[in-house]
Image (spheres, rainbow, N blue to C red):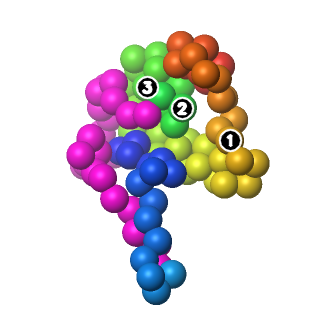
Amino acid sequence: INNLKTKNILMGEDGYIFLSDFGLAKFVKNNKKTDSMCGTPYMMAPEIINNQTYGFEVDWWALGVLIYEMIIGYTPFFSKCKNETLDKI
């Protein structure tokens, strides 16, 4: 859950894309929920920031942030201050 970010997307010489760095990723079985507070602040879903339980839906949030960043050039809740970024989310 929630390990997707631009720094973890690599492209091989053949043009194929690879995901990397699953050190903090968490596998949750059978649609159960978790409550770990981990991840990159600008990619975190509101549920994580608000210390609520969450499931795989936070990955869809991270994918949306990633797509936005790829199209616009920066994240939708960008701020130089971490706490301000979390407040915007």
- Chain-order first, disc 1 or disc 3: 3
In primary-sequence order, the first of circles 2 and 1 is 2
Q: Position of residue 46 (x, y in %)?
A: 53, 25
What is the secondary structure assignment of the residue under circle 3?
helix
Q: Quadrant of residue 81?
A: top right
Give percent across and percent down for residue 43: 52, 36
What is the total number of numbered labels drawn onto the structure image? 3
Q: What residue type is labelled 3?
A: Ile
Q: Nearer the viewer, mark 1 or mark 3?
A: 1
Q: What element carries label 2?
A: helix
Which residue matches tag 1?
74
Q: Are marks 3 and 2 in contact (CB under 8 Å)?
A: no
Task: Decide: is 42 above or below 57.
Answer: above
- Who's the residue at 38% across and 34% down the image? 39
Q: Mark 3 points at which residue?
A: 48
> Between marks 3 and 2, how big is the CA–CA gap?
11 Å
**Cα gap from disc 1 to disc 3, whole angstroms:** 21 Å
- Give the residue furthest to the right: 72
Quadrant of residue 19 in the image?
bottom left
Span of residues in magenta: 16-40
Mark 1 surroundings: few (<14), some (14-19) or many (≥20) residues within 10 A? few
